[in-house]
Image (cartoon, rainbow, N blue to C red):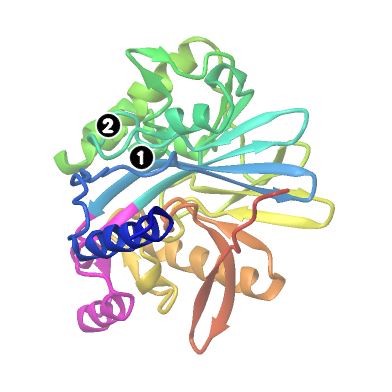
Amino acid sequence: MPMRRLLPALVLACLAGTAALPPAAHAEAPLAKTQAPGWYRTLVGDVEVTALSDGTLALPVTKLLKGDPKKMVAALRRNHLGEQVETSVNGYLVNTGSKLVLIDTGAGSLFGPTLGGLVANLKAAGYQPEQVDEIYITHMHGDHVGGLVANNQRVFANAVLRIDKRDVDYWLSEANMNAAPDSAKDFFKGAMLMAGPYQQAGKLKPFEGATELVPGVRAQPAYGHTPGHTIYTVESKGRKLVLWGDLMHVAAVQFEDPTVTIAFDSDARKAMPARQKAYAEAAKTGDLVGASHLSFPGLGYLRAAGKGYTFLPLNYSTLK
């Protein structure tokens, strides 16, 4: 056979043989078992808000929530959840353009290895702890103040710490701690441990009731979950973000039935109407809301649905 005819025949034969061979095996890839850094940014008018994840904590919610057990389990199942829920712990960094304000600091080292990531995520988001000008605490439970201190040093060395005076007076009182049941004493110890270095440095400056703390950020009492529990409103150019703190803990249950309370409430009789009022206002105004224990980034809107509400997560944006 002439060479010019032989070469195409050989090529075709080689291709046919290759097609008959089994595909080459790839090496197995190990599971990564990690998430991307936990931060998400949005704009409220001209104010930039960065949601920061401190991590998650598995909570036995059916043992903690106070409501009809059958209805709660049914609500959890409808939301593809079990009786133990992996619960987000969120903080929010507010850049007004003139002030950098951190609202809640996460749990730090107080609640184990699945939490304590807020500072790392703050850095991943492009900031450093020493840049924070002010810290606003919704209330002094450990998963909100635990990130204030590490190795007995203030994590946010240049920040002023602002907390409602009712919470400061309650949680930093030795007399209240001594009078509390043993199961509650750690709440006091955590608050004292975390606020102490700021208090000693003259950086703890309590406020009382409703007040504008910096232009565009306002504190509003929502007492009940703790004696001084506070929500914070960020406002710019007619847009609002209302940060609820711990007005709610389990979205799958408490949006559908806002009367359900939780064992962590200092005074459930006050916490429940505070939650109901906040829900009703959010549904009426259409303002953006955020909460410490909504699934990260914990931002969205409320819509009335029967006797309860539906939560609509914030639409994802690249901010470009």
Which image quarter holds the N terminus?
bottom left
On the question of residue 139 being in view, the answer is no
Going by the numbered disc 2, the residue's amino acid type is Leu
Where residue 64 sits in the image (x, y, percent)?
23, 61
| Residue lying at 48% horizontally and 17% vertically, measured from the top left | 198
Disc marking residue 110? 2
Q: CA distance from mark 1 to mark 2?
A: 7 Å
**Highlighted magenta segment, given as a residue range:** 59-87
Residue at image mark 1: 143
Q: Residue at x 33, y 75 (%)?
A: 79
Q: At 63% across and 74% down in the image, what residue appears?
A: 283
Q: Secondary structure at mark 1?
A: helix
Mark 1 or 2 closer to N-term? 2
Contact flag, marks 1 and 2 (Cβ < 8 Å): yes
Which element carries disc 2, helix, strand or loop?
A: loop
- In this rendering, would 200 be left or right of 177? right
Residue 212: x and y in percent read 73, 40
Asked which quadrant contains residue 54, the reply is: top left
Along the line of sight, which residue is nearer the eye, 55 or 306?
A: 55
